[in-house]
Image (cartoon, grey):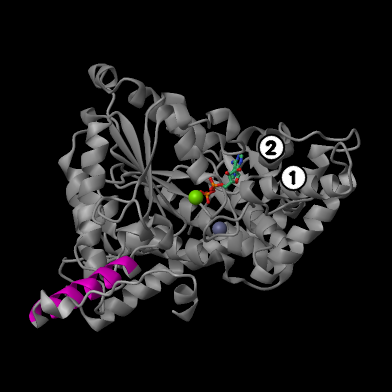
Amino acid sequence: MPFLKRHLVKIYVEDPGGWLPGWALVLFGLGLFLLVVWLLSLRPASFPSQFFSFVRSRARLIRPEEVRVRFEDVAGVEEAKEELREVVEFLKDPQKFARLGGRMPKGILLVGPPGTGKTLLAKAIAGEAGVPFFSISGSDFVEMFVGVGAARVRDLFAQAKKHSPCIIFIDEIDAVGRHRIASAGGGHEEREQTLNQLLVEMDGFESQDGIVVLAATNRPDILDPALLRPGRFDRRVEVPPPDLKGREAILRVHARRIPLARDVDLAVVAKSTPGFTGADLANLLNEAAILAARQGKSCVEMEDIEKAKDKILLGRERKGIVISEEEKQLAAYHEAGHALIAYLLPGVDPIYKVSIIPRSHALGVIQQLPIDERHVYPKDYLLKKIMILLGGRVAEEYVFGQASTGAGDDLEKATEIARKMVCEWGMSNRLGPLVFPHREPYGYPGRDFADIRAYSEKTAREIDEEIENIIRKCYENDRELLSRHIKYLHILAETLLEVETIDGETLKNLLSDLKPLKNVRFS
Ligand code: ADP
Ligand code: MG
Ligand code: ZN
């Protein structure tokens, strides 16, 4: 004040009391307070412009001309790309697609660990099809005020309908789509309302409307089953971390923007980066380029890449995502065990891929057609299926002398088949062709969970014994087969350690001097 006075600034003071009654002031203060609370609930980034569109969806609309990503920019996930090509065809001309009898799923779930290119794939679809792309993160729906998330979902779909054909991309859908029962326990009303609104919206449009909802998650296991029902996210596309070839391809994509020195061999880089995702590899080349630039080099040399890799690995070790050499060995023998058994057994579905690239849960996978409920399977087939499932565990035990947790999923599946054989399909000689009802291990919410067991304790014990017999028999068969053909188990495992993924053709070549069995005996 003195400062102002000294500089001859005139000061006027108005007395508000004269024309505003006290209660109006109180109301005004209250309003101001609410305004502040409201503002605080917004994220700083969206402060001024979105102030009056609080309930509008926070989706970012990217116009077709702004989407620069194409399929060729996404590497190392060829299977996912193949599956998604159809979506591009659909978005280019939904009516034509429908006329030709194509049925497009409304919702597609991209499943894979962070950094494998899910967001990139979603953008590439929009880019290839030349359609707008609405991008929003699941956590943007979840606000502190009940009803806001649901309103945002409604608004998002309303906007999308105006811009169709288009893509809605919901990143981290697990933030809204968690299993409602699993997460029960108060305080989740807002999220539930949001989820319900999402379900309503997904049911409310027709696939001819030209909207495809893509969602990404790395936790498909915690999603509410209601989200995965037909007509919602009923198609699932796996986006796994890349294998050796995939890593090289991704490096090539990102190396397009970077001048490389002659001594840089991307195949060698790919070999030395097991467990790296696409994001890690992009980061690797970026870091290397920064290192090179800092030293005033005109291109990136191998030593820059090596240094960048050390830096990233150190960072990653703290996070504990790196696969250790032992784990990799274990995975290789485990998968080789499955594969060798599947190869030896006659009349089973051929293997089209064996891989030790870690996925969300398992350390590796073999890919075979799964058993579905619609077909009729002979008993033999089921027993062979169990043998294949157990093959991983048996190989681990045979080679390393002890079991690991890596086979938990397999054992669960094997036990489930054995249980069905005894209890549902009447395949046990001892118990005869009877059905023993049993409650489902995974019920849907709202379903009756009452135990409907209708047999004696003695029968229950016999059922357990029969299931155990089946598993034990298959286990012994496996052990016998693997020990007889241990040489091939080593060949497969070593190849897997080297190249990480083996396709069906290569598998046949590796085992070319091993004849599959003519038949197997189970009793
Ligand atoms: P996610 O959504 O699965 O977490 P992103 O799509 O966000 O992964 O990937 C982050 C960045 O990593 C991408 O922008 C891209 O530069 C790079 N990247 C990831 N996966 C790939 C891939 N398969 N091919 C090429 N680049 C990839
Ligand atoms: Mg992402
Ligand atoms: Zn397994």
Instruction: Return the residue at label 2.
Output: 254
The quadrant the N terminus occupies is bottom left
Query: Which residue is at a point 28% across and 43% down the rendered structure image?
Result: 374
- Give the quadrant of residue 509: top right
Instruction: Return the residue at label 1.
Output: 285
- The x, y position of residue 78, in whole percent, is 56, 34
In front here: 264 or 139? 139
In front here: 128 or 228? 128
Q: Could you tell me if the residues under marks 2 and 1 are in contact, i.e. CB atoms within 8 Å?
A: yes
Read off the magenta span.
Answer: 23-39
Quadrant of ligand 1 in image:
top right
Amino acid at circle 2? His
- Give the quadrant of residue 296: top right
The answer to whether residue 97 is above or below residue 202 is above
Mark 1: give few (<14), some (14-19) or many (20+) Cα within 10 Å. Answer: many
In the rendered image, residue 31 lying in the magenta stretch gets the answer yes
- The x, y position of residue 153, in whole percent, is 24, 51
In the rendered structure, the answer to whether residue 139 lies left or right of residue 268 reads left
Mark 2: give few (<14), some (14-19) or many (20+) Cα within 10 Å. Answer: some
Amino acid at circle 1? Leu
**Which mark, residue 316?**
none
Kindly tell me whether residue 181 is visible in this rendering: yes
Q: Earlier in the sequence, mark 2 or mark 1?
A: 2
In front here: 156 or 271? 156
The answer to whether residue 12 is above or below residue 70 is below
The answer to whether residue 217 is above or below residue 104 is below
Ligand 1 under 8 Å from disc 2 Cβ: yes
